[in-house]
Structure formats: C-alpha cells, structure tokens
Image (cartoon, rainbow, N blue to C red):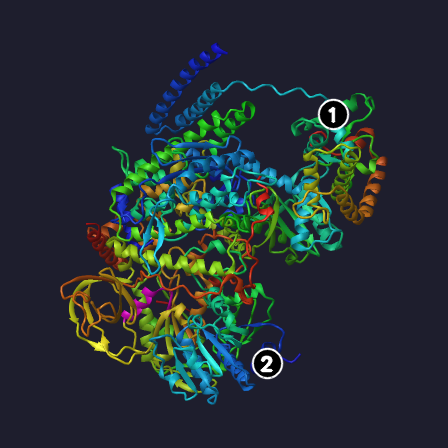
Amino acid sequence: MGPLILCGTVELDALEKRIAGLRSEIRAAKAAGDHATVRSLRAELRKTERAWDDALEPEPEPAKAPLLPVREQVHQALTLLGVPTAAKMIVTVSEAFFAGHITTSQLTSLRRDEEKSFRTSPYARPYYLCAALTSELLSPARGLLAVSTWPLPSRIIGPLSPRADFLTSATRIAEHIMRLTGAGEDASPSAYRLLTRMAQNIPGAVDGFDQADPAQVIAAAGAELAVHEESDADERGEAAQRAEQQLNEVTRLFGAGLKTARTA
Amino acid sequence: MTRLDTLRGPAAPLDHNARTIAALAVNPGCDRRALLDAAGIDKQKTATHLGYPAPFGQSPFAITRAKSFDALVKANGCAHLLRLLRHTLGLSISEASYSDISDVGGNDNHQVRHTRTRALLKRAATDGEGAGTLFDHPLLKLGVAGHQVYLEPAIIAFQIEGRFHVVEIKSFAVIDDQADAGQVAAAARQSAVYVYALRALFASEGLDPDRVSHDVVLVCPKDFANHPTATLLDVRQQLAALDRQLSRLTRIDRILDELPVGITFDIETQSPDEASKAVSTVDARFAPECLASCEMALFCRAEARDSGSTDMLGRTARDELGGVESIPTALGLADGSRSASPEQTEIAEQLRYVRRIYTEAVA
Amino acid sequence: MSVISAYARALAVQTGRAQPVATVRHVHLSATPMVFIPLKLAGEAAAPLAALVGTDPANPRLLVVPQPRNRDLRFAFMAELADVMLPYVESFAGVTETVEAKTPYERSSDAPQLLVPNRGGIAFTKLLGRSTRFRRADGPYPVHPSVPVLGQWLTFLAERAEYAGSSALVAMTEVLALHWATGQSPMEDANLATQLAWIAPPAGQNGPEAALAAEDPLTSPPAGPETHPDFDGQVLDHAIRAYETSNSPAQVREALRTQLEPTWTLMWQAVRLLRELPEAATVDARWAKDRDQFTRETARLADGGFPRGRIDGAVSAAIRLADLESALQTYEAQRAFDDPLVMTEHRVAGKAFSGEVVAVDATRRIVPPGKTRAAPRPLVTIRTSDPVRLSPGKRLSSSRNRKQKTEIVSIARDLVVIQINDQMGRGSTPAPGSVPEVGEIVCYAELDPSGGQRPRLPSGEDTPWTHGGPPAPYVPTDEDAQEAWS
Amino acid sequence: MIALTPEQAAADATAAILADFTGGPHRGVIVDSPPGAGKTTLVVTAATTLADSGERLMIVAQTNEQVDDLTDKLASKAPGLSIGRLHSDGFSVPSRVTRHPGVTTSNKIDQVEACTVVIATADKWAYVSERTWPWAIVDEAYQMRSDKLLAIAALFDRALFVGDPGQLDPFSVVDTERWAGLAWDPMQSAVAVIGRLNDLPVHRLPVSWRLPASAAPLVSEAFYPFAPFRSGTAAADRELKLATAGFPVAWDRTLNEAAATGWALHELPNRHTIRTDAEAVQACAGLATRLLQRGAVAHDENDTHPVSPDRIAIGCAHNDQVAAIRAAGVPAGITVDTANRLQGREYDVTIVLHPLSGRRDATAFHLESGRLCVLTSRHRHACIVVARAGIAELLDNHPSTGRVQLNVPVKFPDGWEANHAVLAHLSDHRVQA
C-alpha cells in the first residue's frame, strides 16, 4: 500500500493547488462582476474538492454477490405473503425471514424482464413474477408484484383489496413466525419488528409499544378481514371473470392498457 | 398571442400548482410578482439571467425525507392513514376502500385523470356509504386568472359519512403536539387551494360544495420518529384569503395597461441588461420577507438598495419612518438639510427630535 | 422596533457601518464562555449532523454524525457532546459563595454560559435536550449514561433562554442586534456573517460591501442549524455515501469542518467586540439570577430529579408566564435605566421624559388615600422638551433611585409635576438627597424595575376543575425512554 | 312560529340561563353577550335571584371601574341587599358606591365576608384564601386571562361566566407560543379554558339594547358570524338631531351623514403618516367639537336628551394617539381612550380613529378584530370613523403569511375579513375631506 499513499499525496497536493487557484479565480471573476464565469468556476471548484475528498479515501470494496438469484428471492417472499405486494415489503420480508439481501432498485425492472421472457417463450418457466390487475380496467396495478401461478382473483386489486391484502399478509407473517417457533426455531428480531409495525395499524392487534404476539395479530387481522372479505371477494371474482374473457395470455399476466411496460 | 405571451417570450409557460397559487397570498401587493406569475414566466431562470439567482433551494435530504414519509403513510393500502382516520375522525372499520388515480389504466394524461377524478368523486358523493373512502392522487382543476389550471395534489381526498376531507402529508415533525408555525401555515395555505378546487368540482357537478370540509387532515411524523400522527387543521381563514386573491387577479389588466407597448421580459433574446430594464418597468413591493419566498428577491433588493429605499430596512422600520420612502430623505429631514413638504412636517419634526436625543445619548 | 432604531438603521446605510443602539453591554459575558455551533440534517426534526464546540478559540472540537440517519451514531454524537459539555457545566458546580439574605444560602460563584450563533441554535439546543433527556442507560434502547444528563442540562439552558435578561444560553445575532443597528433589515440580521460585516467590516471594505460578500455561501456558510442546500447536494451527500462504503468519517468531517469553521471565527470575533463595551450596571444582578437557577438545577439533578416533562401543567404554565412577564418587565426597566441610549426609545414613545428640575416643594405633606395621618409628599416640577404622553396618576421610576415610587400630578405644556411617595427617610421632612433639587437633570419613566408581584396560585395537585383538575404527576415512563428515534 | 319580540327573546334567554345556572347539573354556565345586550342586567338579576333565596355569592370583575359600576347598579336595584365591596389598599372607593347604605367597603376580607354578596376585582380576589362561596358570577370573563381564573377558582363551587366574545383577547408582552395548543394555555381567556376542559352549556343573549338598528346587523355579521344578534330597537326608535344646520364643509357633512344614517366615514386623502397623523387627530377633535357646537339631541326609546360631552367618546388604537387627540383640544368631559379601555362602555356618539389609517402595512395588532369591534360597537346613535383613504388597498396587499399553531381553535372572525366587512359598509357613508 506504500506506493499508493505516495501517489495519493502527490495527487492531493496537485488538487489542493488547483483548489486554491480556483478560489482566487472566483474572487477575481466576482470582483469583475462576471457572474457566468463565477458559476462555472464554482462548479469546477466543487468537482475538484470532491476529487480531493475521494483521493483521501480508499476505494470501497465491491458488495458480495448474492447467493440466490433475485427473482427466486422475490418468489420466496411472495409465496410467504400470498398476496400482490410492493417492492419495499418484499425486500423487508426477504431480509426478515430468508436473510435475503435484495434491494428495491433490483426490483424495478423485474416485471418488464419477466414479461419479455414470457413473450419470447410462454410458460417456459415454472412461474413468472407478474402484475396484479386493477379491478375496473384490468390494467397493471402500480408497483405491485404477484406470482403467475396464483388463482386470478387473488391477483385482482379492487378498492378494498389493498386493505384486505395487508391484513392477509400480516396474518401470514404471524403464521410463519408461529410455524418457526413451533418447530423450535425462533424468528429473527427483525421479523418481530415487522410484525409489530404491521400490528400497530390493525385494531386490537397489539397493546401500546409492546412486541406483537402472533396469535393476537392473527385474531385481530381475521376479525377485520371478515368485515371486508365478502365485498372484496365479489369484486375480485367479477373482475377475474372479465379478465378470463377479455384478456389474452400475456395481458392476463401483465395487464391491459397503454403503457404496460412503463408502469411496471 | 396575448400580451402576457409577449411578455414571456418563446418559453413555454410554467404551470401553476398549489404552491404557486398559495403564494399569491404571500405578497399580493407586488405588481412585479403578480405579472410574472400571470404570464407563467420562470422566475428562477429570470432571476439567474439577471445575475441574481434565488437565495434558496431545497436540500436533497429534505426531498428524500418527504418522499419516504409520504410512501410510509400510504404503504400497505394506506395502513397508517386508516389507523389515523379511525382514531381522529372515527372512520368505521368497514370503510377501507382505496382508489389510486395517478393513472387510468396506465394513461396519466391530465384530462383523462381529471375526468376519472370527477367520476369517482361524484359516485362517492351520490351513492353514499361504501362508494369509496380514499382517493389518492386526484387531479383537480381550478380557474386562475381566466384559464383552467390542473392541480397535481400530493394529497388524498377522503370521505366519511358523506363529508369529504383533504389529507395533506407533510414531513415536518409534530413534537409534543406542536409544529413549526411557519410550516403549518404554509401547509394550511396549500391545503386551502385543494379544498377550494374540490369545492369547485362539487359545485360544477351540482353537488353541495359544503360537503367538502374546511377541516384538513394533516399527517406528520410524530416527535423524533417516523411514526405518522394526524391533526385536524381548520383552513377557513386561508380559504377566505384565497378566494379574495383569486378574485383580484383581474387587476393584471390594470398593470398591463401601464406597461410600455411591445415590452417583453424574454430572457432568451434579451441581454441581462435589457431584461433587467424591462423587468424594472413594473413596480415591485420589496420587503425583506421576500428573501425567503420569492425567486426575484435579490434583484428587487438590489434595486431597493440602489434607490436608497426605506423598504430595505424592513416593514416595521418603514412604518416607523412615517412612510418616508427614501433613506436620504429621512436623514435629510432629520438633520434639516432637506426641507419638509407639507405632508412631511410631522415626521420631519419627529426625526429632528430623534436625531437630537440620539446624538446626545451616543455622545 | 422604535423610530430610534429605524433612524439608526438609516444612519448605518448612510455611513456604511452599523450604528450603536446601546452604550453599554447588557449581557453578561463569561470569562470562559462555551461556543456551540450545532448543525442538523435537512428535512429531519432533530437529527444532529455536526457541532463545533469549545471554550478555546484556538482549539474547537469538531463532532460529526457520519450517517445522520443512523440512530446509534446520533447517540454516539450526543455522548461525545456530553463528553465536552458536562465537564464544562459541572466545573462550575463546586465553587460557591454565601448569599446574605433573610436565610443565607449558597450560590455558585460562576455558571456555564453557552453561546450559539442565532435563534435557531437555541431552538435546536432545546430539541436536542427534548430528544435526549428521557433516554435511559438501561432497557431496550440503552444510551451512554451521560446522554440523558446532557439532555437535562440542554433543557435547562434552553428554558433559561426564554427569560429576558438571562445570559445562560445566548444567541449571538440577538445580542449583537441589541447593541448595534445595521443597514439591513432585522430579518437579515439573523445572518451572523452579514450582521458582523456591518458592525466590523474587514479593512478596506464598507458595511454593505462586506455584507454582500458575506452572503456568499462558499465563503460564509450558514451559521446553522440548517446547512446550505447546495452544500447538502453537492458535498455532503457525496461524503455520506463515501462513509457508507468506506466506513471512514474523514470526508464527512472535512466537509462539515469547512461549513463550521468560518462561523467559529465569527463567534469569537463577536465575543471580542462585545468585550470592548463596558458592562451595564445591572448585568451582574441578572447574572446572579442565572447563577441561582444553576445552583438549584445542580442540586435538583444531584437529588436524582426527573427530567422535565414534555409540557407544562396548568399551574406551572401560569407560574412560568408570570415569571417570564416579570423578568421582561424588570429587564426592560433596568436596560433603560442603565443606558441613556436605550432610554431614548421610551422618551420618543412618550413613556419617559428627561429634563431640568425647575421647582421643588419639599415640605409638602398630605393625607394619602386610605391613610389617616399626613405624610411627606414633595412635588417636583420638571421642564422637558420630550413629547410626554403620560397622564396624571401614572407611576414612574427614575435611575437616581430605582426603588423610589413617584407619580405624575399634572402636565402642562413642557412642565411636568411629579409627587414623590417614598424613600425619603423616617423624618417629618425628606432626608437630604432623597428628593431632586432645582437645576438637576433628571429622567423619569413609566418603567417598573421591581417586576411586579406573582399572583398567588394553587399548587399543582390543587388545580381546580376549571383548569381540568389536578394533572397526573409526571413520572418518566418506559415509553418515554423508548420513544422511537429514527 | 310566531317571531318573538326583542323583549320576549331576551326574557326567554335570561330565564333559560338562570334555570341552567341555579338548577342545572353543571358547575359552570357560559353566557356570550354581544355589545350592549344587557350583560349587567343579567348579572344583577342572577345576583338578586340567588340572594333572594338566601344564598351567599361572590362577584368577580376585571377592573375597579367595572366593580364600582356593578356595585352601584346592584345596590340601586336591590337596596336591601348587603353588599361587600372588597378593594385594594390605598384605593379610594367612589361616591357612587359609598352612597348606598347597603354597601360595606373594605380592603380586608373579614370586614365584608358576612355580606350576602361580596364583589371585587379578580386581582383582589387572588389574595383571598381559606374561604369558599357556593356561587360566583364572573363578569367580563372574555377579558380575563386564564391564569387569573386559576388563582381564584378554588373560592367557588359553581359559577356563571358572562362576557363579550367579540372584544379584545387577553395578551402578554412575552412569547407564549410554548403553550399554544394546550387546553389550559394561560394566555387564553377564562372562558376559553373552562370551555375546552369542561363540557359546559353556552348561552347567548340575543338582543343588543345599545346598538341601534343601523349598527346591529353590521356588527353582528362582521364580528359575531356564528352568534348573530339583533337590535332591541327599531330604526324609528332612535333619532339623532343636529340643532343647527351646519356649513357645507367636510366636518359638518360628516356629522350630517352620521346623524341621518348612524354611520359616517370621514375620509382624508391617501397618505402614509406617522401614528399621530396630525390631520386625522385634528379631524377627531374637530368633529367632537363641532358635534357639541351644533347641539346634537338624541331621541330614543327612553327619553330625549342633549348629547352632552359625557355621551361622546373618541376611540383609537394607541396611547400616543389618545395623547395627541387630547392635546389637540377636545372639549372637557369627552372621553378619549384606547379600545382596550373603552371595552364595556357606552356612549351616544363615538368617533373612531381607524387603526389602519395612514399605515402602509398592517400588523396583527392593527388587524385584530376585537379592536375594531370595540371601537365600532360603543354607540347608541352614531359612529363616525376617521380614516385616510387607501385602507382597502392595504388590506388587499396584506400578505397572509401568518403563523398557524396546531390544536389552537381558529379565532373568528379573522381580523382581515372583519375589516373588509366594516370598510365595505362604511364606503356607503363616505364623506371626503
């Protein structure tokens, strides 16, 4: 590492000289009232200062390569949840239960890639990560990912579905924690944190700032779900029927509408 | 091509949004600002062209924070929001429906979204219970100075028992039930614009506009955490002020009439000097408070300083100086080097007295 | 603002330099003040980002939070701050003096003084105190034991700052504005760099030139607690990313140092300027109050006192309001009696007048209302050219004897007749010197340095039904200590 | 439904209040009373009703003048009643109080506590302890700061709070934002704090006996938008006559307009001035002088009397304006005072120096609705407003950037709106000087 430091010092000296030079040029330009030059010099100054900062620092190590492919980690999380889910939640669940390390940015183009793959060779894969469909227009619902093998009604999003799906996912997370503890393992603290956070938004699911109890969450979420279930199921069923009739095999998975890909 | 288009030049007009409309009430006495806004001129670019870039901006950290808080409140089918509404307004458990109007089947065209907004809200208003509770990203429309402006509200409209509320999500903190009064006031002014536009929509659909409540649901982070909390904010006073400001926009014609023929503020074809002369033909009403809110403020301040205007000392100082407009005049009256006009007799007498006791005390 | 300060501002514009609005220094300046310049992360309520702090102008301590969104790093920062501040604060607790009073008591001979750049610095200090004083060293989210102690002291100092005339925690721009009128607006005076540029422009520059130059965020970064948005976007964001990848805070430190050091220099320049002013007569008495409160807080904390609650109950709010009003009334009066330049503000408002005594009826005796025996009530006639706007019966005080009560008897053109009501000794005629003499120049004002009396209020547990009944006494809870801080 | 006469409406309201106060389940009853709605009469009636049934009672008012007025009226109405007037050391009680044989005055509570009714200012009551009264009446409760009530609330079991919600709010010279939003914010009025912390019945007196038919609708709409009231008299019941015809000059034209319509706006040319604008000051003093010179006679539902100096008041916003107007030569006996000190008082004719006259910018102080409300609701016959032109523009140009605190009930009306409403009305009565 010796030579590197030496090199860095030389580089630092040069940069410092340049910074000092730029500062005096800015002062001069300012005194002359040449605002345009001041602005461009300032930008240059900031760039140089950053370069100086960077020169002071060693290069960051590259992140470790993932063990499972991203789409499989997503599938894992979605299978646990059983309902169309937004990227952020998928990431959180993956981390809490599967020691996953995907980031939301890795999920942004996932649906588009899956669609491309499906169009090229339909049903070549055992499952596709696909869209949820809005009940009224059967267009892809913004930001949600689903699994192609699920029954169509569960991929439909009606007005009550976001709430119903939230309650369902809370229930399934609680059930999974109970499965783990039942099997003698314990869920991670982040799994409990996630459950507690969700429970705080379900009436009667948790007391104050306590950690949520899975059984209590299941009971409370079930109670509220019972209120919405029927109308939500009706809406979804009706829309699913329409989708079966009106959509082709691609749009049934990835949604109808003008800008399918863009809204992914 | 209207005179306002001529003023703006070839650049496309800036869109109004709730913030710019709310800003109409910030310094309504300023002709310069009124005209630039009415013509849809980019004040930021204009000020930069004139050599006085705006003295403020927004930190990327603040922007990120605002976005992530907004996402948090709406996450999981608005789970946080439903909790808050159930708690503060007694929303019943069964009312949990959520419609997103940020696009219509993937189409985010303004007209399409606005039509959908109207349809959904009308249905909710006429069909009664169960016909919709939360409406995210409604696209509203408002008549401003004679033309229709689309408003892209970062809000949710919300119905409870036939009354509609605006939900405003802001990322400033509510600590021990108090929040920064300046930021709350700004939020109230902006929300008032949405309430106003929503009421206009109701009226045009033949619905009672009073079904849109003047109580806005303000959602903010509580204390030092990210946990959202809701407070009801009564915006009746802001609505009254907005109503009056909108009705006064017609005075633009009066300002235009006083302008030299053919004048333009176009910054693409004019040099900074030329543009600066042109802008100066419209009077500004500079006050130091402008520095926090108007992109043109540094230009206007320099103008006030060059002319020795008492405006640069602040509104209170100006009032204390009995309305004398220039600093040299005030000091001239004080030391007697300038004789007072009849309407300056009183302030001159006071200033002479002030000068005498001030000089004695400093000595 | 009065017409006096408006005039002084106009004069500043004309002369190109700030003009005095005080002839003496009205704040206490410690021999070893601690300068504290905190910065916060934009968009967050109270996420500390950095601070430059210390008592030695040549040796500031830079503290930073390399990733301000990380709660553990924030508390590590607070622990570090405690490491600087607590030894300073506690160093004053040991040395005391005995105060001669009805019941003599011990008072710290000196007390800590914290100087922050502006009003925002005080508000942020208060928030830092609020966000740390309920923390605990044990339980689910433990912090370093010094953090809640620091929180208690920051809260104490921030609450002292609400009292007029306290010098325990002082915003520099406000102190400067108390002594100088610049040629810019009061709003712009909240910028320490431009304000100082008007007061003491660098050689070769006048005030307005220097102030304009000092608006450049590159040479004079904001004095906090907010940082400049361009700095955030172009420098800080980058540096924080570098920390996340490298785990080395060096870049963040360097970036923040550039933002803080110019203000550090300005703060000590301001201290030097203020030291040049002679101290006003009553500064010492007010500082004694600060020392009293400091002594009490030290004792309270030594007894394991709870952190102060989040809000005042009905009774404590009423008591505080009365105390704040009394402190302000006293301070306003003391300042005017200490400083003829401050008194001009009251003279021009017609609430005070200055003039020559032209007649004295020293032997006058009357039976005062409600009394049965005659008592000396001398009359003094003063000729003044001030625009007196007081009416008969108004109570006045004067700097010649601030305790003496006088009242206006009559005003006719430029002649004001006042009656002296007390402080004339026990004899049947006034004691020598207790009544002004003909030819003396005197100044009387409708100002009461005594601060009035605090109304008698019930104790907290006796809060009546009208005010919601007795509140539950404040006991810190786990919930307070665990309050999420993300 | 048959419309009630003003007398019936007022009697019904009083009966309901007394029933609620003496027989209801609440510890407190709030009565909102618009200007001149018979607040004092209500207090006297409530006091005598309680006293007649053998109950002991304490009365709280805010200033010595209010206490003396109440004592005088109470003693006149019920000469047999034993009344204790408690006052501070060194205060000389005026003869209008001491002339009543039933009144005992003292600065010591033990000298007066045996009286059936004990009456004092809130400040004096704060020094009374270890005694309680079953009943209390708190007068001018909207002027009373919440912390003052806190100091005396332990003295009574049940209380009637009477006051005018449209007048000036209590204020403090210190920054009180720290308590903003708290239900017990010490800066609120006594009524606000009891109302927020207790579920108490609120009654309203529906008729103004002071304000003429020409003024009640405007004052009601501009300042009491959610608590409307009406005038107890019809237009024909009140008449203001000027004995001499006057000259065709501005002052006389203004007086003519005021006499004919009950309102006049004496408008001076638009100009920014210092607070003690000499022309405006001169106009205030001059109009008052001319009014006396022209021999104004007031005819009302009770009698016909000349408008003597004690029936005229000049009101303004600041003390220095009061001083300037007094110095400008106002005939002896005419009241000149600030809005704060005119609260609760009544005259035949008032002359008002508009708080916004000659200003370039308005501050919250000058816009406060309570200030304008007090100034424009003191008269039985006519109100003359003196102002420079340009107030409409000032209001239009006023930036609405005020601070908003969470959980603080919005105060209605907003000063800005109230000012607009009054100005719009006055523009129909404008006389240009």
- At label 1, the amino acid type is Arg
Left-right relation of C40 to D25: left
Image point 42% across, 24% down: which residue? Answer: A45
Q: Are marks 1 and 2 on the same chain?
A: no
Q: Quadrant of the C terminus of chain C?
A: top right
Total residue callouts? 2
Write down the residue under mark 1. Answer: A71
Image point 52% across, 36% down: which residue? Answer: C74
- Please tell me which residue lies in front, B33 or C6: C6
Name the dominant secondary structure of the magenta segment. Answer: helix
Magenta range? D315-328
Q: Position of residue D147 (x, y in %)?
A: 47, 64
Write down the residue under mark 2. Answer: D15
Q: Position of residue A191 (x, y in %)?
A: 70, 35
- Please tell me which residue lies in front, B103 or D118: D118
Left-right relation of C417 to D318: left
The kind of secondary structure element at disc 1 is helix
The answer to which image quadrant residue D334 occupies is: bottom left
Image point 59% across, 69% down: which residue? Answer: D200
- At label 2, the amino acid type is Ala
Q: Position of residue A37 (x, y in %)?
A: 39, 25
Residue D87, numbered label: none
Task: Give the Cα separation between the discs numbered 1 and 2.
Answer: 79 Å
The kind of secondary structure element at disc 2 is helix
Q: Position of residue B16 (x, y in %)?
A: 55, 43
Question: Is B208 situated above or below D80?
Answer: above
* Chain of the residue on which disc 2 is drawn: D
- Please tell me which residue lies in front, B10 or D416: D416
* Chain of the residue on which disc 1 is drawn: A
Q: Is residue D284 visible?
A: yes
**Pointer 2: residues within 10 angstroms few (<14), some, or many (20+)?**
few
**Pointer 1: residues within 10 angstroms few (<14), some, or many (20+)?**
some
